[in-house]
Amino acid sequence: MNVRNTFDFVEAPAVAADDIAWDRTADVVVVGLGAAGAAAAIEAADQGAGVLVLDRLNGGGASAISGGVVYAGGGTSQQREAGIEDDPDNMFRYLKEQVAGIVADGTLRDFCDGSAANLAWLEAQGARFSSHLMTQKNSFPGGAWGLYYSGNEAYAPFSDKADPAPRGHIVQASGYATGHGLMKALIGTLKGRLRERVGVIDHCEAFQLLTDAQGRLLGLRCRRVGGPLLSVRRLINRVANGFMMGMPGTGGAIRRLARHFGGGGATFTVRARRGLILASGGFVFNREMVAEATRGKVYSPMPLGEECHGSGIKLGQSMGGAVGQMDRLTYWRFYAPPVHFLNAVLVGPDGRRICNEALYGATVADRMIEQTAGRGWLILDQKTLDKVRNDMKQPMPVAQKIMGWLYLARCRTSAPTLDGLAASLGIDAAELARTLAGYNQRIEDGREDEFRKPDGYRSVLAEGPWHAVEVSIGAAGNPCFSLTLGGLRVDEASGRVLREDGSTIAGLYAAGRSAVGICSHTYISGLSLADCVFSGRRAGRHAAGAVC
């Protein structure tokens, strides 16, 4: 059977005939039903607009299979219940370092000022959060917890800029990853309270924008796939999503099977009277698009998401939309727990230390890319390795236990001496010895760590045999997951898509990972979902109020 390449279906815009009979009409049309698309649709409908939402798969997007972390602060009710002091100014000072000027200070201030209100808005849609606080360093504690340090808030140099405050709010739902609970609440609002004003069509590919003779956006052409086998297609996609977080290759293979059930499909047209919002995610699963954007500099083969392949971005580009940050990928190099991995020293091929080992995993990966072409090893002595092994005997989520054993079983190299370890790895032995000597001397002298790693994660490394755990981004035994961070450039007051000259395209909006936003420079857990809500509501609100 000839299966169409679903990663390459966007066509150039076409001029609609003056007498076109539109198959469907809505005030606001949203392409993509993840967190950004759902937030946009709810906001537009609450402003009185009639809304039609189109999703290429089952609905829920990458948001539904995510960990369910929403980055929020400035004094949320959960922070207050946990006894955490935070305010919008403090949140702004921290995020200004993370965001690195990708959005204007005014936009970032709006994000911080409205953060607690946006979390309360999610609660009003039915999402549940908790004040159950995790204080120990943890890459992602899972749905059993409610609040944790989900970025670099507690660690230098970021802690120099703002008072540390935990802002990772975990959706309360079943399982370890709870993004499904967030999307159940948002989609429940669309199909429940707002059902009279919102229509949802799944397994629908938006493949062409339609304009008038002057090039003004009118609507789009879509293809509904599945036909009489739509229920089978939905089931296969649900099964595929169960593998996408840990085994994306397997999940992708299962999803490809779905394309054999009800491919093709009838096309139809949709008139968007006030606005069209592109919110169909990034493009990490589109290898050709990633290779072009990064010029082949891809450090890991492990994409993360629900087959995000860039069709929304391509639709925007087809109308002259400009893009930004397309070469920015985030890689997740998490290794704690087990917590005693933080007592190791992270070095590159030159034997020199790279950064504070307690930094957020994606930040560690960024540092490795900047300094060592993405390569690095955690150096441990026998005493520290024994503590890591003891950590592995303690209760922890299954996913983290598997990750820990992968590091120990597939990424570890050992040698009786430090010189022997360096030789096995191809590391500069003399420089490695100097690095460890300097690290140990600071501890013995009672001096602050070179990168100001907390004292609780410091111990003298001196007792062989010696061990190195490879944490290179593309380590064969445990490669990093990756996400794309770039997208369509937008006007930050409205979410309208920008042209290269900075002018806006009337009626065309982008949100979430289809757009450049708060997390388009670097990633910390929860910031993408928070930006989806922020940018989605912004686009929905503006599109609903647009003049026809």
Image (spheres, rainbow, N blue to C red):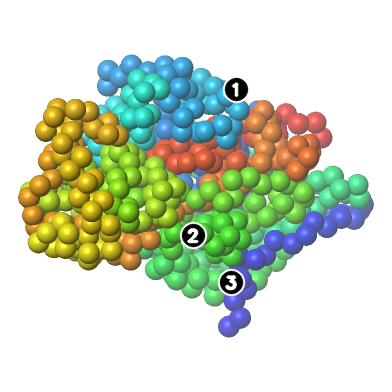
Identified by mark 2, the residue type is: Val
| Res 160 quadrant in image | top left
Q: Residue at x 33, y 62 (%)?
A: 475
Q: Residue furthest bottom?
A: 1
> Which marked residue is nearer to the observer: mark 2 or mark 3?
2
Question: Where the C terminus falls, by quadrant?
Answer: top right
Q: Residue at x 44, y 47 (%)?
A: 370
Label placed on residue 506? none
Q: Secondary structure at mark 1?
A: helix
Q: Is residue 524 visible?
A: yes
Q: Position of residue 239 (x, y in %)?
A: 40, 63
Q: Secondary structure at mark 2?
A: loop
Q: Residue at x 61, y 43 (%)?
A: 515
Q: Position of residue 525 (x, y in %)?
A: 39, 40
> Which marked residue is nearer to the observer: mark 3 or mark 1?
1
Using the image, determine if residue 290 lies above or below residue 216.
below
Q: How many other residues sit within 10 Å of disc 2, few (<14), some (14-19) or many (≥20)? A: some
Q: Which residue is mark 1?
A: 106
Q: Which residue is mark 2?
A: 298
Residue 7 versus residue 25: which sits nearer the camera? Answer: 7
Identified by mark 3, the residue type is: Gly
**In this rendering, position of residue 457 left or right of residue 130:** left
Residue 174 versus residue 293: which sits nearer the camera? Answer: 293
**In this rendering, position of residue 378 left or right of residue 22:** left
For marks 2 and 3, give the CA distance: 34 Å
Asked if the residue under mark 3 is in contact with the one under mark 2, i.e. CB atoms within 8 Å, the reply is no
Residue 485 versus residue 176: which sits nearer the camera? Answer: 485
